[in-house]
Amino acid sequence: MNNQAVAAHSVRAPIAPAQASSVSPATLDDSGKLLLRVAIGVLVLLHGIFKISAGVGFVSAMLVKAGLPGGLAYLVYVGEIVAPLLMIAGFWTRAAAGVVVINMLAAFGLVHMADLFSLTKQGGWALELQGLYLFGALAVVLLGAGRFSLGGLRGRWN
């Protein structure tokens, strides 16, 4: 047998990639989901903590002005405390992020409509922070929690 025939019939072991330097795409996706849900959750939670200390009087006044019962203002605690904590933990993540989306839509409708199409002096959207919360939470609704969560990867609401 010549050298070419031997080379063609010999079995070579595949070269193993360096295990320490490779990160799977799934791990990167789950890490991105973790970062997104924790960032949005913490930022919204800080607003909820402020409302615990300052009260919901401002929100109640806005609701009454809009012709709604002022008692609905206490739902802000669900949208800015309970839901962000669930998002951070990764438990019922999609539902919790949905509550944040509803909370932000209510904030847009009650407080921020006048600035909806306004720009700042620097050229940014006047509601960019609120938009970040809204669209970040909407992204979490669509993406779910990922495997780095208390609810697990396959949970119905994760």
Image: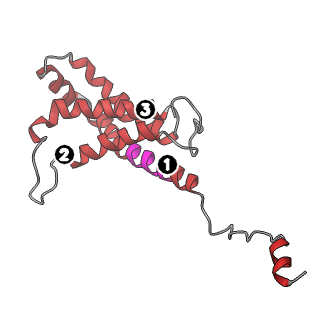
Tell me where the magenta segment starts and ends, as one range: 32-42
Where is 80 relative to 73, above or below? below
Q: How far apart are marks 1 and 2 (CA)?
A: 25 Å
Q: Where is residue 131 in the image (x, y as percent from the top left)?
A: 25, 44
Mark 1 is on which residue type? Leu
Mark 2 is on which residue type? Leu
Nearest to the observer: residue 12 or residue 53: 12
Task: Provide the residue designation for mark 2.
Answer: 127
Q: Where is residue 75 in the image (x, y as percent from the top left)?
A: 32, 24
Sequence-earlier tag: 1 or 2: 1
Sequence-earlier tag: 3 or 1: 1
Task: Provide the residue designation for mark 1.
Answer: 34
> Do the residues bearing badges 1 and 2 touch, measured as CB atoms within 8 Å?
no
Task: Provide the residue designation for mark 3.
Answer: 96
Q: Is residue 46 visible?
A: no
Residue 109: give its label: none
Tell me the crowding category of disc 3: few under 14, some 14 to 19, or many 20 or more residues within 10 angstroms, Cα based.
many
Q: In which quarter of the image is residue 107?
A: top left
